[in-house]
Image: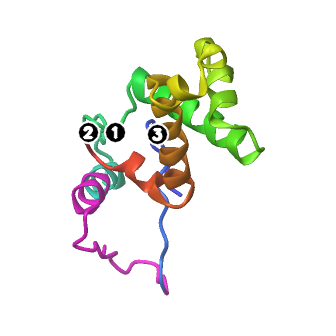
Amino acid sequence: MVADVDGEHRLWLRDPEPGRPLAAIIPLDKDFVTRMASLMRFHRALFGKPPGPPPRGWRLTDYRLARLRAMLRALDLRQSGATYRQIAAALGRGEAASLSATEWKISAARSFVVRLVRDGTAIMNGDYRKLLRIR
């Protein structure tokens, strides 16, 4: 691991030999731009230069952080057996409890909670990598 003020760089070396130059293999996939930005920052740090600020889009905005918190809370409640209506109430959508079944089916609160649970499930199942991509 190599320290960096914005987070450490983790290296996996295959058959390391002291004094031998390092090589980087970067897949040409949808994360290529993010991987290159990370590699460039690491390269600068490795040679004693300031790595520079992280690319715009790496840091999560306050809105995205709040949504992630709500997503994790909704997913946790759903996995504990809560209904969508109970989740809506727990997330501060108190009006959900007073809606009739018909009103609840078409309510914005229900749609919001269903999306949170859906997106939280996707992140749990591997989409968390999207959080690391440059947006």
- Between discs 2 and 3, the one toward the N terminus: 2
What's the residue type where badge 1 is placed?
Trp
Q: Amino acid at mark 2?
A: Pro
Using the image, tell me which numbered label, if any, was put on residue 55: 2
Q: Amino acid at mark 3?
A: Arg
Q: Secondary structure at mark 3?
A: helix
Crowding at mark 2 (Cα within 10 Å: few <14, some 14-19, many 20+): few
Which of these two is toward me, 80 or 16?
80
Q: Which residue is mark 1?
A: 58
Q: Which residue is mark 3?
A: 115
Q: Position of residue 131 (x, y in %)?
A: 41, 46
What secondary structure prevails in the magenta region? Answer: loop
What range of the chain is rendered magenta? 15-38
Q: Are marks 1 and 2 in contact (CB under 8 Å)?
A: yes
Measure the C-alpha gap from mark 1 to mark 2.
6 Å
Give the side of residue 41 with respect to residue 8, left or right: left
Vertical position of residue 125 compared to residue 70: above or below: below
As for residue 114 lying within the magenta part, the answer is no
**Figure quadrant of the C terminus:** top left
Q: Position of residue 121 (x, y in %)?
A: 55, 52
The residue lying toward the viewer, choosing from 18 and 102, is 102
**On screen, 48 above or below 89?**
below
Which label lies toward us, 1 or 2?
Answer: 1
Relative height, residue 80 to residue 128 (above, below): above
